[in-house]
Image (cartoon, rainbow, N blue to C red):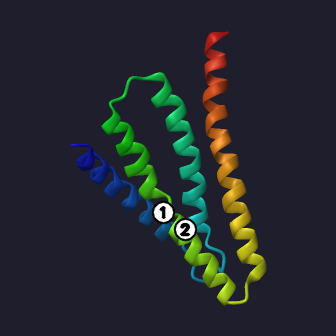
Amino acid sequence: MAYLWIGIAGFLGAILRYSIGLFLFDESLEFPFATLTVNLLGSFLLSWFTTVFVKRFSIPDHLKAAIGTGLIGSFTTFSTLSVETVTLIHNNELFLAFVYVLISIAGGLIMSRLGYRVVKEKRTNEHT
């Protein structure tokens, strides 16, 4: 049954990712803003979800997997980041490729930390 939930959530995550890609895509730009946006947002959401829901509430394992692996996992995309980086390198856009990878990795870590901190600060404010 978990596979069904993961599949449904994965479908929704992929549709969201594709929709944001269409919305943010600009053919005139070399830099892949759409992929960067979904990956940074996904980093925040996964951290926030695991901090808020997984630790605070008793959620069945199949729903945790559906949201974390299915929805958010299919929403973000490391493979697209890799292909877009190689494309930038192939097009002799070495600086843009470097900036893209740097922002993707550092930004993903920062967004994950932010997701965790948002929850932690909210909990602290609720207890005071």
Residue under label 1, please give it: 20
Looking at the picture, does residue 45 appear above or below residue 85?
above
What is the spatial separation of the Cα atoms under label 1 and label 2, in whole angstroms? 6 Å
Camera-side residue of 111 and 64: 64
User: Which residue is at 62% across, 68% downward?
Assistant: 33
Circle 2: element type: helix
Image mark for residue 76: none
Look at the image and tell me in which quarter the N terminus lies: top left
Residue under label 2, please give it: 24
User: Which residue is at 61% across, 63% downward?
Assistant: 36
Circle 1: element type: helix
- Residue 67 at what x, y percent from top left? 39, 43
- Residue 41 at what x, y percent from top left? 57, 52
Question: Of all residues shown, which one is farthest toward the left?
Answer: 1
Total numbered badges shown on the rendered structure: 2
Question: Of all residues shown, which one is farthest toward the right?
Answer: 95
Camera-side residue of 36 and 51: 51
- Residue 56 at what x, y percent from top left? 48, 23
Position of residue 88 in the picture relative to residue 67 (left or right):
right
- Label 2 neighbour load within 10 Å: few <14, some 14-19, many 20+: some
Circles 1 and 2, Cβ within 8 Å, touching? The answer is yes
Position of residue 92 in the picture relative to residue 3 (left or right):
right
> Which kind of residue does numbered mark 2 sit on?
Leu
> Which kind of residue does numbered mark 1 sit on?
Ile
